[in-house]
Amino acid sequence: METAEFIEVLRRDGGLLGDAAEAAGLDTEVPSCPGWRVRELVRHQGVVHRWATRFVAEGRRRPEPIEAEVPEGDASLLPWFREGHRALVAALDAAPADLDCWHFLKAPSPRAFWARRQAHETAIHRVDAELALGRAPSPMDPDFAADGVDELLAGFHVRPRSRVRSGTPRTLRVRATDTDAARDDWLARLSADPLVVERPAPGAADCTVSGTAEELYLTLWNRGAYEKLQVTGDASVIDLWRRTAAIG
């Protein structure tokens, strides 16, 4: 996907998040985020948007804490969220292609990184807000969903901080069934060391999990049901994944 496409997803899903949060009410529990109410969800996303905007708009080159000043009263919370979302979209729209700033995953450029990361961050929390409202999540573009699976597997879980480990080497294949079969097919090699991911998968694995790109996206990001996926081979591998791979 192109950077401009990620920005459009961010623009859309930030609006949907705000609308769902308003309709649900700030005191409503968020089932996909135990311990959170919609209030905490909106605060979190508003803080993250402002944190990301500082890097994009100001070209900051060092990591900084994820923090921002949050309104004390509920009445100001959603307008504050929407203001921060608009500022992030505007900053990404205006950022030059050669933007130089800090980022934390491999990407073609810092601007491309922040557009992609914030699109997925916002999409996941848009889903949370819609689940709090008690309705099924809005449909997701399959290519965007497949990209989110790739970011999770080949971005987050290859880092040393990932808890996905296996004393006995195992392999897990993740395969999307509704997108480019030659592209959206991953092989994750689990061992005592950080995960190694190959794409496309070179062949068979101890366990293969298949589903639509959206089903894989929601499930691997802890917002869907593993029961909806097709699992073949050694199911203990996907059980290990479920226990160790959670990212909020």
Image (tube, grey):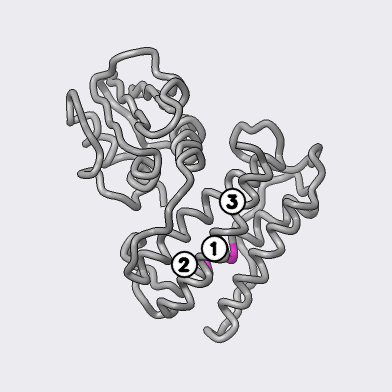
The image shows residue 45, relative to residue 218, as above or below, that is below
User: Residue 118 got which mark?
Assistant: 3
- In percent of width and height, residue 134 lies at 32, 69
- In percent of width and height, residue 221 lies at 39, 46
Task: Give the mark nearer the N terminus: 3 vs 2.
Answer: 2
The image shows residue 153, relative to residue 206, as above or below, that is below
Structural distance between the alpha carbons of marks 3 and 2? 15 Å
Residue 156 in view, yes or no: no
**Neighbour class for label 1 at 10 Å: few (<14), some, many (≥20)?**
many
Structural distance between the alpha carbons of marks 1 and 2? 6 Å
The image shows residue 191, relative to residue 140, as above or below, that is above
- Magenta stretch: helix, strand or loop mostly: helix
- In percent of width and height, residue 197 lies at 43, 23
Task: Give the mark nearer the N terminus: 3 vs 1.
Answer: 1
Magenta region: 43-47
Q: Which residue is mark 2?
A: 41
Q: Is residue 144 left or right of residue 106?
A: left
Residue 203 in view, yes or no: yes
Q: Is residue 71 left or right of residue 19?
A: right
Residue at the (66%, 52%) spot, across then down = 64
Residue at the (57%, 66%) spot, across then down = 15
